Image (cartoon, rainbow, N blue to C red):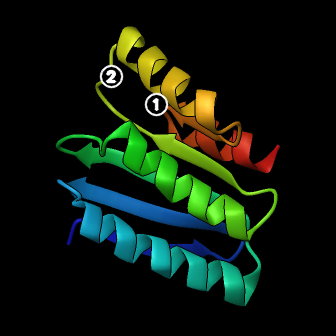
């Protein structure tokens, strides 16, 4: 199972854990699951743990994911945790995403991601 979605009731953060390789179809299923949670619980903070992915989805697909959520709910924030990225890789990913979306940030640690989401 490439993606698992759960809610941390204490922090009010939607957690998505991705592993292996995530297809566009699987990303679409995750999007629907997240939108159902947002609609039913009103949560606006999302953290994606992509540390176990073989390869990150295309930036364009991440952008579509965030745009669809942001178009339905104001004030959403998306933190993506990645592993084994060089500083240049991180900079490239973050610049590509932040050019389109201001509410997405890339992190290499869960603690930093949660801190940013809660801030």
Category of crowding for the residue at label 2, using alpha-carbon neighbours closer than 10 angstroms: few (below 14), some (14–19), many (at least 20) = few
In the drawing, does residue 95 fall left or right of residue 28? right
Q: Tell me the residue that label 1 is attached to.
A: 108
Q: Tell me the residue that label 2 is attached to.
A: 85
In the drawing, does residue 22 fall left or right of residue 79? left
Point out the frontmost of discs 1 and 2: 2
Q: Quadrant of residue 93?
A: top left
Q: Is residue 116 visible from the viewing direction of this image?
A: yes
Category of crowding for the residue at label 1, using alpha-carbon neighbours closer than 10 angstroms: few (below 14), some (14–19), many (at least 20) = some
> What residue is rendered at 52% in x and 64% in y?
15
62 versus 22 height, above or below: above
> What residue is rendered at 47% in x and 71% in y?
31
> What residue is rendered at 54% in x and 21% in y?
95
Along the line of sight, which residue is nearer the eye, 68 or 41?
68
Residue 104 position within the rendered picture, expressed as x and y whole percent measured from the top left? 62, 41
Along the line of sight, which residue is nearer the eye, 97 or 9?
97
Are the residues tagged 1 and 2 within 8 Å (C-beta)?
Answer: yes
Q: Quadrant of residue 30?
A: bottom left
In the drawing, does residue 55 fall left or right of residue 16? left
**Which secondary structure, mark 2?**
loop
3D distance between C-alphas at marks 1 and 2: 8 Å
19 versus 99 height, above or below: below
> What residue is rendered at 73% in x and 64% in y?
44
Q: Quadrant of the C terminus?
A: top right
Q: Is residue 11 visible from the viewing direction of this image?
A: no
């Amino acid at each position: 199972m490439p993606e698992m979605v759960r809610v941390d009731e204490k922090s009010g953060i939607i957690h998505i854990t991705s592993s292996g390789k995530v297809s566009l179809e699987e990303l679409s299923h995750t999007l629907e699951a997240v939108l159902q949670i947002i609609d039913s619980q009103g949560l606006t903070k999302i953290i994606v743990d992509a540390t176990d992915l073989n390869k990150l989805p295309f930036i364009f697909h991440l952008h579509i994911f965030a745009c669809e959520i942001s178009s339905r709910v104001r004030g959403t924030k998306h933190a993506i945790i990645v592993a084994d990225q060089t500083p240049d890789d991180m900079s490239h990913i973050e610049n590509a995403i932040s050019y389109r979306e201001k509410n997405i940030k890339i992190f290499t640690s869960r603690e930093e991601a949660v801190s940013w989401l809660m801030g």
